[in-house]
Amino acid sequence: MLIIASFKHSAYLELALKVMEQKGISKHDMIVAPLTKPNELTDDISWKTIHQSGKSHHDNAFIFATIFMLLGAIYGFVLTWGPIIWALIGIITGGLVGLFLDYLIRKKLPKNMDNNSSEVVIMIQCNQNQTEMFERILWQHQALGIAKINSYPYKNL
């Protein structure tokens, strides 16, 4: 039986490996492979800009500036300074409100979202009767995902 699990690189991974060694899996029956991420792509386009395309850091500022400008222009026909002055006041006020909301949103985001951390893949060869125990150990130590393969053609990894 072959068990494959993926982890974030953390202390939980080390604890899971230690517990499994104590439960009877030798180091020869395990493969631990860290996955690496590229620091920079050689192309001019980075993956970060591809995945975040369409979302600017100041979208809320532009949206609120547009809305406040429109409201200033509409209600400026009724107010004393006229629609142009109130539209300018609205665009400045809306932009500042949007920037403030962007700041609050970024401040509330969790700080532990580390995109640079890598994942580690563990492959464990064990007996059929040990699979539930090792699967439970892996889930208790915060595995991201687990796969079990029943028939594995090789005796040792």
Image (cartoon, rainbow, N blue to C red):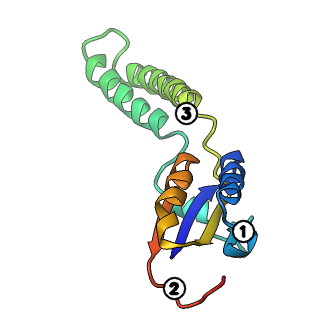
Residue carrying label 2: 152
Element at label 2: loop
Quarter in which the C terminus is drawn: bottom right
Mark 1 highlights which residue? 26
Give the percent coordinates (x, y) of residue 25: 67, 66
Kindly identify the residue that appears in the image at 55 percent across and 64 percent down: 5
In this picture, is 151 found above or below 67? below
Rounded to the nearest angstrom, the CA distance separating label 2 from label 1 is 18 Å
Counting residues from the start of the chain, the first of labels 2 and 1 encountered is: 1
Instruction: Using the image, determine if residue 113 lies above or below residue 37.
Output: above
The residue lying at 47 percent from left, 21 percent from top is 93
Residue farthest to the bottom? Answer: 153
Question: Which of marks 3 and 1 precedes in the sequence?
Answer: 1
Residue 69 quadrant = top left
Q: Nearer the viewer, residue 2 or 7?
A: 2
Residue flagged by tag 3: what amino acid is it?
Leu
Q: Is residue 25 visible?
A: yes
Q: Residues within 10 Å of mark 1 (few under 14, many from 20)?
A: few
Residue 109's mark?
3
Q: Identify the image quadrant of residue 154.
A: bottom right
Expressed as whole percent of the image width and height from the top left, the position of residue 156 reads 66, 84
Q: Secondary structure at mark 1?
A: loop
Q: Nearer the viewer, mark 1 or mark 3?
A: 1
What is the distance, in whole Å, between disc 1 and disc 3 at their CAs?
A: 42 Å
Q: Is residue 119 left or right of residue 139?
A: right
How packed mark 3 is, by other alpha carbons closer than 10 Å (few <14, some 14-19, many 20 or more), is few
Cα separation between marks 2 and 3: 44 Å
- Residue at image position (58%, 48%) is 141
Disc 2 residue type? Tyr
